[in-house]
Image: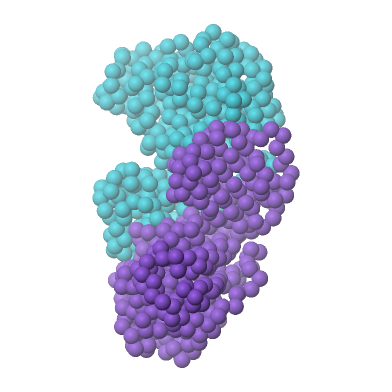
Chain colours: A purple, B cyan
Amino acid sequence: MALAVSPLAPERFPEIPVIPGVRFAAGCTGMRYRNRDDLMLAELAPGTTIAGVFTQSQTASAPVLWCRAGAKRGRGQAFVVNAGNANTFTGKDGVSAVKTTAAATAKLLGCAAADVFVSSTGIIGQKLPVETVTAALPALKQGLAASAWEKAARAIMTTDTFPKGATATAKIGGVTVTIGGFAKGSGMIAPDMATMLAFVFTDAALSPKVLAELLRDGADRSFNSITVDSDTSTSDTLLLAATGKAGNKKIARAGDPALKDFRAKLDAVLLDLALQVVRDGEGAQKLITIRINGAASPKAARKIGLAVANSPLVKTAVAAADPNWGRIVAAVGKAGEKANRDRLKIGIGGVLIARNGGPVPGYDEAPVAQHMQGRDVVIEIDVGVGKGRATVWGCDLTHGYIDINGSYRS
Amino acid sequence: MALAVSPLAPERFPEIPVIPGVRFAAGCTGMRYRNRDDLMLAELAPGTTIAGVFTQSQTASAPVLWCRAGAKRGRGQAFVVNAGNANTFTGKDGVSAVKTTAAATAKLLGCAAADVFVSSTGIIGQKLPVETVTAALPALKQGLAASAWEKAARAIMTTDTFPKGATATAKIGGVTVTIGGFAKGSGMIAPDMATMLAFVFTDAALSPKVLAELLRDGADRSFNSITVDSDTSTSDTLLLAATGKAGNKKIARAGDPALKDFRAKLDAVLLDLALQVVRDGEGAQKLITIRINGAASPKAARKIGLAVANSPLVKTAVAAADPNWGRIVAAVGKAGEKANRDRLKIGIGGVLIARNGGPVPGYDEAPVAQHMQGRDVVIEIDVGVGKGRATVWGCDLTHGYIDINGSYRS
């Protein structure tokens, strides 16, 4: 099944600078896809610190459990990722496949198996043919290159229609550090305190504790604020690796003012990647940005925003460029968070549509309908009960989603 | 927009006996639909007791707030229902429209305005032209007839493709009582401790307190266990009226053994109506029954079942008759309730597919795929952590849903 590239895709994959201490390779195992890479190896210099956030699913995959343990240790020397088979709900075979992959990679690279982070994405419930992975690894080691960002990003795609990369530079105490990363994801996207597969790298020198805190905060405002279809995955994994090669001075706390610029740039890279995932949402024709104000708390604001973003009725209305704002009222009402029906305000595309419990008198629908014809639809909601704010992002629901998901597996 | 009748529709509207103390009429106000009835009046004998359950939405409609107050009083003499305009998020005008409707009906029937229950269903956020309602009422009063069940059921339809009725008889202390009712609903169906519009009548003599308890229990196992699209409505209303004309002896407690048969028959009528709503789910081609066992509690079981029933990926897989059970694993995992990945069991159409954390060795997909080609798809899940059980019902997600909801309003 060849999918057309999403109309919301960026023009091109970004130019990501080399990050000292990181090299990539990709290759084809043929386990599911033909004529494309489906295995990615990232080699990390000794001493690299690692942070990770993962799916909260009760049926998390074997690779997620393995990576969660690795992230607790806070150090690592390799990421190995295969696409096409999620190695999820595969029982003891699945656990053993992860261990075998980690051991084979460790032997090749001369590190401990515990330093190898293994991720898998694709079909759930099929046994992973691990020998095809281990057989492909030696050639990948030969091909490691610091500049192979796009090749690596392409190798982890499943129903994605374009590779997703992002980069930024930041200053830490006068030293310039670089951040670069890539992500995959298109369906089964409703990260729950976690994300789809995303891998971010920096040459900054940061302790595991500081790295973990920066990543958790950034993930909340990016990957944890997006949804394609409300279906949280079993495999969501976001890993951040810091090689320390930039040589900035040691920072003890995530709250240190010296990290202000780095934190902002890391957040920007995470958000860029997260939005590319939404822009590649299965069948998506429009990106929906939902800004919530006036909620009881930031958490309540995000929950209300996600209720609107996940509403099939709102999503189909956006697909049809139909300013059917009553469906937004209903979605706010069902979110399970406090809202004041008579103080609720709703705007679309900068036009205030409803307030004080009813439509704005004389409201002109024409400019709203025109805004909704575009690729970027902005919905603003004031819930009228407090000061909690959040922004979430989603996409429309079209025939494309049904075409893709009625035929992905068979 | 004329929609084809759902392939899951029952063959015909049932024969519902006359219930002493209840008469119906319907007429056309023309406020939204042409050439069909859109206003329903049910007249109830003096002394009729009433129970109701309603949407938990924070943006509940003016009619819901009015009916909630009425149900607290526990008595009533009329239901007035219009279709095409939900009178929701209509501010003071909306509240005033409800009061005007109740007052006009009360004057016609010679009762108090507080005894008139008003419901509205249709577009959210448009002012209700209440004068077209009050103008139509006198003719409705003239046409009241005890046998007009189907006419009444048809008058409250919106995107419904068939009218939904159900009936049963039960014995209370040797006296035969009759139960009859009708419902509407097709989209924006994810009742939250409530339901879409449904009206059920009986000639049993039951106190408001007993009636309320019976209805709450029955709603939990029927309307609160169905979903079409996860979008809880602002207008969900289920009213049960008991005229007392059957002359059974007074019953003081809902737990009285004399009510055992009545309770079972009431539950059956409620479930029948609820399933007809799912069978008329927008775009539905298949009814999905999900039986959950082994959850931490019955409530946890229902939540897990609804997570599966609401998963767009499960729904599209069912539409495509694709036994993609990995999506069921993912939906169980995201439900936010305890599940044991390594004790989880999944079966479809009576075939055990997965257990002990992986697929059943040698599992044959062919009979499962064949089962999924049919109109009724049964999914059985054992969560592996406790004794909580529940059954929930949903439908598949097809192109029809997107066609309907991209064009309903404009």
The front one of B375 and A258 is: A258
Q: How many marks?
A: 0
Residue under the image location 48 percent in, 24 percent down: B67
Residue at horizontal 66%, vertical 47%?
Answer: A350
Locate residue B339: give its quadrant.
bottom left
Image quarter in which the N terminus of chain B is found: top right
Image location of residue A398, percent across then percent down: 61, 55
Picture residue at 31% right of the left edge, 14% below the top: B250
Query: Could you tell me which residue is drawn at 28 percent across and 21 percent down?
Result: B253
At which x and y percent is residue B193? 41, 36
Above or below residue A292? Residue B171 is above
Measured as percent of width and height from the top left, residue A1 is found at 58, 70
Specify whether residue A101 is in view: no
**Is residue A72 left or right of B48 when viewed as pictured?**
left
Quarter placement of the C terminus of chain B: top right
Q: Is residue B97 visible?
A: yes
Q: Is residue B142 left or right of residue B320?
A: right
Q: Quadrant of residue A337?
A: top left
- Direction from residue B341 to residue A315 in the image, left or right: right
User: At which x and y percent is residue B160?
Assistant: 58, 37
Outermost residue to the bottom: A142
Tell me: residue B123, above or below residue B94.
below
